[in-house]
Every structure is written in structure tokens, then in C-alpha cells.
Amino acid sequence: LPELGGQFVLRLAAACGGEFPLSLLQLWSSGSRGGRGETNAVLGKMVSLAVIEPLGDGPSDVDLDLDLDVEMDEEGEKKKKREDDRIVKLTPEFRKAIQSSLSSLKSAPWDAVPRSMLIAAAATATAAEAPPTANDLETYTQRRWDSVLHFLVGSSPDDVEDPPAAVVSFLEQTGLMQDDPDWVDEPASEYDEAPLVITSRGYEFMLQDVRVQVWQFILQYLNSLKKHKRCDEIRAEALIFLICLSFCTVGEAYPASSLSADGRKLMNDFSQFGLIYVKDVGKDAKTGNDVKVFFPTRVAVNLVAGGDGMDDDDGDGVGGTESSAAAVRALDASLHDPRPSRSHVAVIVQTNFQLCAYTTSELHVSMLGLFCDITNYRRLPNIVFYRITRESIKAAFKLGIEAAQILRFLRMHAHPRLRTGDQPLVPSNVEDQIWLWDRERHRVKLDEVYSVQCRTIPEYRAVEKFAAAEGAHVWGSEAKLRHLVRFSLAEKVVAHLQRWRTREASRKQASAVSSKRAHKATRQTSYA
């Protein structure tokens, strides 16, 4: 909900008994900048989300143009009175849930396991492993997705494990990877089948935020349930589980036993994507089964409430380009750590098109090389210097990467110090130049054509008329008696030209025979 909608909900649920007259609710936002137009939009959004009951015939019937100073006739007064009688009312389900949430001392829907119990369990276990902290969970998620990105680009460092088989399967299903089209099955080949290579969609995927990447996997996971007998039930359970995770606290442990059977299956599946960290804490004394707890990561907590991160279509830096405050703090801490971290990259773009990236990860170096000049760069232990050039940006475009994606990546990974001032995260001259290079691709449109050479002007005009009617004509020169037609329709044009020539030859032959007969008849008359 928008911020104003959240204020409406809190007032309706906590102070107004769940309902309030529409005309008086208008006064709540009378001093806001958006005024009545903003209130109309907010109420329409609340109706569409089933937060409040419809105000009339449907969600679109939200008209708050209630001017008390306008004199109205009798019919108008009746209409005005009907509008004054309308009530904004929370739906029973939402009202019950929001009041339960407001009155509860717990923020999460499950009881958190005290950290002291986890430490005690770790001390008695064979492998004494302390419960993860919030920073450990951040590193866990980043490593899990680094393994996916390393697999995408085909690199396999020793300290990075391959992604699970389920994740590799999703990479194929989502079109991020495909079988190598140039692979040839040879006896000496090290592969029994065609290896997977990255696609243009895969390059686009690499430059996105982790949260957006996870959403793509979640959507693909939900789509993969189509053939399941209980598809709708499991999908509903998955959405409820994701929403419940958004109310959890990063670093807190929650018992897996509090989940349903489907919930525990989803917990294991989501742990494959780095959403949840699952940990065994011992054995159940009664059943002997493993006792598990799960730790929601920052990505899981922000997945639903943090927006979709994909609404930056105009490259203005709004929507999906700014890192969350937690991510910025983690990046800042990583930069101040005496031991360089491989999980983060901090980028500074200068006005002279030089790019400075604080990173020790080969993966980040490869990602920056997608749109930076890799033929001439300098590297220090914890920083690499690139230069953005026209050729490097053009090479990125050929891979299927868009200008908006490059700029989003630069803003998303901007150095924390750049976020403290009023200056843009990417210099305006660099941003404008990248957009200009992008527009160069659309200056010239290339069409595959076929050349048709005509013999006479009538033939030229006949071909021109037919090609124009079929939408095949591209260019023509009457002086050269030549046409260029679309290659896909060239067969029809050539067939028409042959028919026209055949008809023209038959017509000329018939005309010649007729002339010959007329000449012969004239000679016979003269002899007579």
C-alpha cells in the first residue's frame, strides 16, 4: 500500500472500529500535496487489494469530489446525500488480521527459538557450529548466488561450489542457459552431451539485483507446479509462506516443526535459492527425527515488502536501482574490513568515463568486463580500474544487454560514499552518452532484400504496382529499371513478373499474327 493507504488502515483499525464515513475520511488528507486525486487512487488501490469493501458498484466507483460550498439542485442534493452516506469499511478478514497483528507482541507469525538454546545445542553436537549471524546470512545468500553467476559465465573457482541440480534445471527452463549450438559430438570430447552456455537473457540476469534474480526463480518454481494435482493449494501455501517471511527478523531462528508438511517442503526448496538457511540442531527425544530450524535471509524478508525492483524503465534511477539500507551497510562494513570480501563490489564512475571498482572477486571483474574495455585495465589487490568506451558498450548491446540495465547495475553497486551527497550516482555526462550510444542502434534499419531487374518501363511499373500492393516494395529506380523488394516476399514478386512477361509475350504474338492477317487481306484486295 502507499504511505497514505497505510495511514488510513491504521486509523480505521485502531481508532475507528474498522469503518468511517467517506466524506470525513476526505478531511484526513485535505492538507496533503496530492489532495483528492491522491485519495481517490489510494482508495482504489485498497479496494483492489481487498483491504476495504467496494464503495459502490466496484473499485472504479471511487469519486470523492465532495465540494460542500457548491449549491446544488434538488436532484444534486440527493446525490450528495448518498455520497455522504457512503462508508469506508475494512473487509472482515483484513480487519481481524490487522488487529491481531497490532495487538500481538510478536512481529513474526512463528515463535523464534532463543539464541541461547541454539548455542547450547551447538555445544553438545558433534560438529559444534554456532548459529549464523545476520552478516553470516548475508554472506550465505551472496555465495549461493555467486555460484549461480559463476556457473552462468562458465567459471569454476576452487572456493565456489556448483549450484544444486534444481537450480541448474531452472537456468535451462528460464532460458538463461542453453545447449551449446556449436558443440560437436566427438570421441575425444570431454562432454557426453552438449554443455550449457549462457544466453542473452542470461547476461541480462547477471546485471540484476539479487532480489530480482530470486523473484525470477520463485516465479519459475510456481510455474513448474502446473502439473501437480494440488497445484493451487501449494501455490497458495508458497505465497503465504513468502508473506510470512517478510514479517520475520533477519538472524532469528524459527522451528521447522511450526510449518505444515507443504511448508517444510517449500522450506527445503527455497533453501536451494538462498532464501532460507536451514540448520539441524539435534534429534527429537521422542521420535528420533532431526530437529531443524530455519533462518530467513535479508532477501527473503525484503522479497515481498521490498518492491519488485524491475520498474526502472526510463533510466532515471527511480525504482529498483537503489540498494536497500541493509545492503549498503553490509557493503560499507565490507569495505572497512581489513580482510577484503568477495561478496560485494563498490563502483565509482568518474566524469572521464573511468570506472573504479572495489572488489576482489573474479566474478565481479567478469561482470564489469561485459560493458567495460577489457583490453586496457589496471588492477590492484582490492581495486580494478576500467574505462567505459563506445566499443565496449556496443559489445554489450550485441550480447543483448540494454543501456537501462547497465545504468541500473552502476547505481545499484555505487560506492556508499556516493550516497551521502546530492550528486548523482552516475555522472550525467556518462549516463547521457550511454543513452546516445544506445540510440545509434536505431538510426539505420536493415532489411534483407532481393534485386529485381526489369527490361522495360511498363514491366517496371507493373512490378512496382504489385510489390506495393503486397507490402514488399522497398526501393526502386525507374532510370535503372530496378526494384529492391523484401527477401521474404521476393518469390511472389518474381512469380508475378514471370506471369506478366508470359502474358506480354502472348499479347505481342497475338498482335503480330493479327497484323500479318490484316496485311495479307489487304494484298489480296489490291490484286482483285
Image: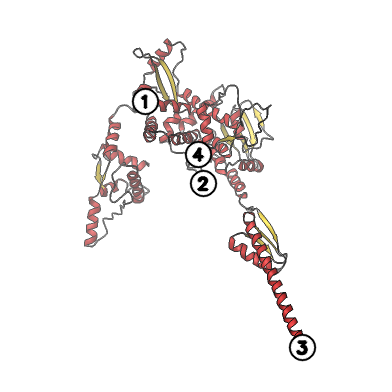
Give, as a three-letter code, the residue at label 2. Asp
Residue under label 1: 261
Residue under label 2: 314
Q: Check the picture and name the quadrant holding the N terminus.
A: top left
Front position in the image: 342 or 519:
519
Q: Earlier in the sequence, mark 2 or mark 4?
A: 2
Could you tell me how far apart the alpha carbons at marks 1 and 3 are, in whole angstroms?
Answer: 113 Å
Could you tell me how far apart the alpha carbons at marks 4 and 1 are, in whole angstroms?
Answer: 37 Å
Image quadrant in which you'd find residue 111: top left
Q: Position of residue 469 (x, y in %)?
A: 59, 63
Mark 4 crowd level (few <14, some 14–19, many ≥20, 10 Å Cα): many
Q: Is residue 89 above or below residue 61?
A: above
Give, as a three-letter code, the residue at label 4. Thr
Residue under label 4: 321
Give, as a three-letter code, the residue at label 1. Ala
Mark 1 crowd level (few <14, some 14–19, many ≥20, 10 Å Cα): few
- Left-right relation of 412 to 99: right
Task: Give the numbered dot on residue 526.
Answer: 3
Mark 3 crowd level (few <14, some 14–19, many ≥20, 10 Å Cα): few
Q: Position of residue 46 (x, y in %)?
A: 33, 44
